[in-house]
């Protein structure tokens, strides 16, 4: 390996580490590529959009990041997966999406798990826990609507 190749490897490793650290700081939240790029831009660090996508795709393939495409009009969202999100080897990621503002809320509660189990046993239908979105209005939009 030449010195030039070694520097490129270290650069890519540093960028991945920085992206990973950012995702860890947003654990439990969903972020877009635009959010990540904006964060690094505000910090005065240059990371190209293509690099961010490439690194996220690798992390998704490795199972440490989830990618959500909720609908055709929204950007994909990414979320770092910590060990608390893993259940029997699968990742359960139920969401609520506000029809008005687009806010995405991550759900982790036993009642949802109970409902999913009920649907499977009583209705013979297995729900994909990585692709489940309930649509409605978030608290802030309901309050604005009530004013």
Image (spheres, helix red, strand yellow):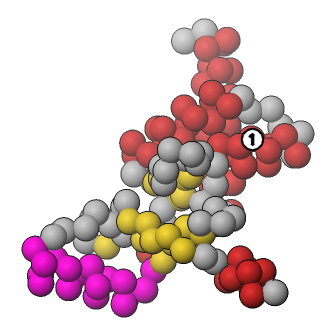
Indicate yes or no whether the magenta region holds residue 51: no
Looking at the image, can residue 10 be seen? no
**At 12% across and 84% down in the image, what residue appears?**
122
**At 45% across and 71% down in the image, what residue appears?**
134
Looking at the image, can residue 23 be seen? yes
**At 50% across and 70% down in the image, what residue appears?**
135
* Image position of 81 (left or right of 47): left
**At 58% across and 48% down in the image, what residue appears?**
74
Q: Is residue 47 above or below residue 75?
A: above
Can you tell which quarter of the image residue 100 is in?
A: bottom right
Can you tell which quarter of the image residue 79 is in?
A: bottom right
Give x and y (percent) for residue 56.
54, 41
Density class for disc 1 (Cα within 10 Å; few <14, some 14-19, many ≥20) is some
Foreground residue, 97 or 42? 97
> To which residue does mark 1 refer?
37
Q: Is residue 126 above or below residue 65?
A: below
Part of the protein shown in magenta: 108-124
Q: Quadrant of the N terminus?
A: top right
Query: SS class of the residue under badge 1?
Result: helix
Foreground residue, 80 or 125? 125
* Image position of 39 (left or right of 117): right
């Amino acid at each position: 390996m030449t010195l030039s190749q070694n520097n490129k490897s270290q650069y890519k490793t540093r960028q991945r580490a920085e992206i990973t650290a950012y995702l860890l700081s947003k654990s439990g939240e969903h972020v877009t590529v635009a959010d990540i790029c904006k964060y690094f831009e505000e910090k005065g660090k240059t990371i190209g959009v293509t690099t961010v996508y490439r690194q996220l795709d690798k992390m998704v393939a490795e199972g440490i990041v989830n990618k959500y495409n909720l609908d055709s009009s929204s950007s994909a969202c990414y979320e770092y997966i910590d060990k608390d999100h893993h259940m029997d080897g699968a990742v359960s990621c139920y969401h609520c999406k506000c029809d008005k503002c687009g806010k995405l809320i991550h759900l982790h509660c036993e009642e949802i798990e109970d409902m999913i189990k009920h649907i499977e046993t009583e209705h013979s239908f297995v729900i994909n826990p990585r692709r489940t979105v309930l649509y409605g209005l978030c608290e802030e939009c309901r309050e604005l609507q009530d004013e």
